[in-house]
Amino acid sequence: MEKLLDQVMKKLLDRGFVDDENAEIVRYGLELLIMKTIISAVMIATAIITQSVPEVMVFTLSYALLRGCCGGYHADSRIVCFILSMFLLSAVISAIKLIGGIAAFFTSIGFICMGIVLIFSLAPVDTPNKPFDITERQVFRKRSIFISCAALILWTVFAVFRLYNFSLTVSAAVFITGLLLAAGRHSNRKGAAT
């Protein structure tokens, strides 16, 4: 990936699209874009192979919206991020495939309750590389609560219509977000102590 980034940045610099002053920022943005594209492509392929495209779409959308406003733990490297993302997706797909019917509903109740409690008590959690100021903290707190409530409503709609696999995917997104908030808070404290 470094070679690809080097080539793209060289072309952008040579053609005058980017100046030396902003090159590092542009490179970082491209790096994130490429990583997200790779993760998305692998998620789509995994969803197709496991025949769980609708469920993975619901999970991915719910999870992306929650993580975007709640924050939480972030991996130290792209490789760890990729592995963690694939592990989480595999866990969700496994839960969908292994837990069915009413058991999926009851499992989703536990997930949604624990996740909502964690989000409401911890969100947002920033990172040492990108700390929030007071205004950002307030804005992201409101967004976190709003998106969590929207996820709860979506979970309820799926549960009412007995679409238990979908209620499980939404609750998994909420629960995983809550866990990553707790992990992020712990990581921030651990980093501050050293």
Image (cartoon, helix red, strand yellow):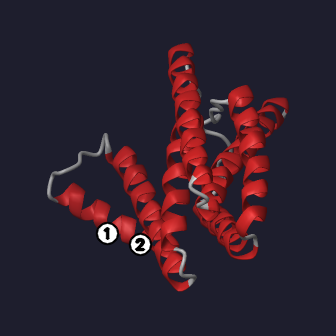
Dot 2 crowding, Cα within 10 Å, few <14, some 14–19, many 20+:
few
| Secondary structure of the residue carrying numbered label 1 | helix
Q: How many marks?
A: 2
User: Residue lying farthest top?
Assistant: 134
Residue, x 63% and y 67% (percent of image)? Answer: 89
Residue at 49% across / 81% down in the picture?
48
Q: Residue furthest left?
A: 15
In the picture, the quarter occupied by the C terminus is top right
Q: On screen, 58 above or below 4?
A: above
Which sits in the foreground, 27 or 94?
94
Residue 3, how many percent across, how many down?
Answer: 41, 72
Q: Residue 3 got which mark?
A: 2
User: How dense is the environment of label 1, judged by Cα within 10 Å: few (below 14), some, or many (20 and up)?
Assistant: few
Look at the image and tell me whether residue 165 can be seen: yes
Q: Which residue is mark 1?
A: 7
* Element on which disc 2 rests: helix
Question: Looking at numbered disc 1 in the image, what kind of residue is underneath it?
Answer: Gln
Marks 1 and 2 sit apart, C-alpha to C-alpha, by 6 Å
Residue 120 location, quadrant? top right
Please state the horizontal and vertical placement of residue 9, each as a whole percent of the image.
30, 60
